[in-house]
Image (cartoon, rainbow, N blue to C red):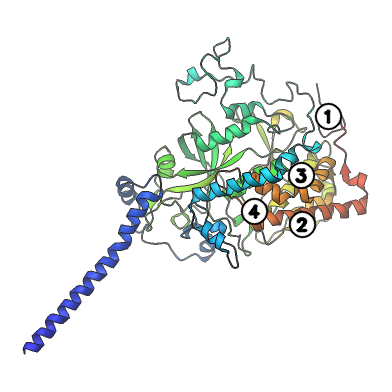
Amino acid sequence: MILFRKFRVLILMVFLIACSMHIMIDLLPKLERRSSSACSCSHTPSEEPQNWAKHRAKPGSESGWPNKHTLRILQDFSNEPNSNLSSHSLEKIIVGERSEALKRFEQLTGDEKRHTARDSVLKNAAVKGSRLSALFEHPLYTRPLPSLTDEDTLFNVNTDIRFDPKAAENPEWNGEGKDGDYAPTGEMSSDSYPNWLRFHIGINRYELYSRHNPVIDAMLKDLVSQRITSVAMKSGGTQLKLIMTFQNYGQALFKPMKQTREQETPPDFFYFSDFERHNAEIAAYHLDRILDFRRVPPVTGRLVNMTKEIRDVTRDKKLWRTFFISPANNICFYGECSYYCSTEHALCGKPDQIEGSLAAFLPDLALAKRRTWRNPWRRSYHKRKKAEWEVDPDYCEEVKQTPPYDSGTRLLDIMDMTIFDFLMGNMDRHHYETFEKFGNETFIIHLDNGRGFGKHSHDELSILVPLSQCCRMKKSTHLRLQLLAKEEFKLSALMEESLRTDTLSPILIRPHLEAMDRRLRLVLQVLADCIEKEGYSNVVEEDLLAEGWNTGTPPQR
């Protein structure tokens, strides 16, 4: 009897010890998460945001991610645990064996990685010299513009632009000038305007910005460092975009990160179902500069605090209501749009930090009207139907007889845009815009490039159909493409050097850079076939010797 009682006591003690161990094991991860979150980021969500989110969220919204709707779940990369890491450890993962040096590099924090990468760039530049600087000093990149008249500039500073910080009654507009730097009228002189306004003033008939304009770099720094004062959702579009206003009254379009750098668009997805990538917007701006088009508004990357810089400053109630705390204790939101704006496609931070692209706004439409044109080679945006150009090999002959493609440089500008899109793999070019003031004799603006750089393993040759059908190109573009195919001015090396200046570097993984070199060779091969078939003078149009801009006649005076 005594032994039986001792045995029961022993079993009870073992049971109590096992329960205690289970409780400790259950509590340990929570304690580790609290300690790590307290020191891993500059701002951790306070108790107030958590209570706020739990109060606002609908029942069941935080109970886990849905696993239904297979098509959308396949595209929902935002649910993956590492989809919004501020450090770029995933970008460093390369298939195959890793060296010890790479393993040590993987253990660094995001800031240490960026500093290490930039230091190596500076060392290489000191030894070898900057390829990018050498490119921009090449004669093809130093060609002057014709003299500008009032008809060639978007704004006349003396009459069109007025900016008086006193009228705004805000001493924190971060005035770029000093006290006393006012014009006799009591207004700020144009040199003292904020950088975004100086960018607007510099737009002319031939370019969005000049090649070596220091205002552009200064404006990009403003987009990264300026305090965000207001956030609102942009109306229209298939995916969520935010309009951010800064303390100097500048505005930019914010596209948040939705997937990691190395994730490719699944092969079974249609082009109109693809995600818009923030890093594609950044890379498109740099590619546009290297091609010397200067038709993409300046874009930079920024790491944004979703709590302080979006939720706390927005007056958009529809946006504010969509914030919640995820099961992983991260701040998330999804906004309102026609696609991918739901809890299963929410944008989540780590815990509330998310990276995205910021594209500088063009002048307000009330000040500078823009005309929207339908791309002649627009896709059908249908699962079964094909566009006319896909079934008619002589489609370009019809386009050549249609204004504004029957005169001027518009058709040649479409060829430039075709090459630009092919190098990125962008199939989503349905419209383009021009400034109404300049009529048809002006450049076309390359807006909305977020669906580029989706597949590095596939070259979509249908994007090149306009070039293969029309067999037309500017001589300046042809010579620049040949230059970028040379080893000393290799396109991938130039892009890598240029992209390393962005705060979110690395922007593109190595396979995307190598894909651009491969696609450039394909473009030159298509041109070579056109020249062999139709003759050089019938394919390559002279624009270097003309007195006017890309035309055989001088610009209007």
First of labels 2, 1 by sequence position: 2
* CA gap, disc 4 and disc 1: 35 Å
Q: Disc 1 marks which residue? A: 548
As shown in the figure, which amino acid type bears the numbered disc 2?
Glu
First of labels 3, 4 by sequence position: 3
Task: Please tell me whether residue 531 is drawn above or below residue 542 in the rendered image.
Answer: below
Q: Disc 2 marks which residue? A: 390
First of labels 2, 3 by sequence position: 2
Q: Position of residue 63 (x, y in %)?
A: 36, 61
Q: Residues within 10 Å of mark 2 (few under 14, many from 20)?
A: some
Task: Say which element carries label 1.
Answer: loop
Please identify the residue farthest to the left as the structure is shown.
Answer: 1
* CA gap, disc 1 and disc 3: 19 Å
Marks 4 and 1: CB-CB under 8 Å? no
* CA gap, disc 2 and disc 1: 35 Å
Q: Disc 4 marks which residue? A: 453
Q: Disc 3 marks which residue? A: 416
Task: Please tell me whether residue 482 is drawn above or below residue 133 in the rendered image.
Answer: below
Name the one closer to the observer, 108 or 361.
108
* CA gap, disc 4 and disc 2: 23 Å
Name the one closer to the observer, 492 or 283.
492
Task: Say which element carries label 3.
Answer: helix
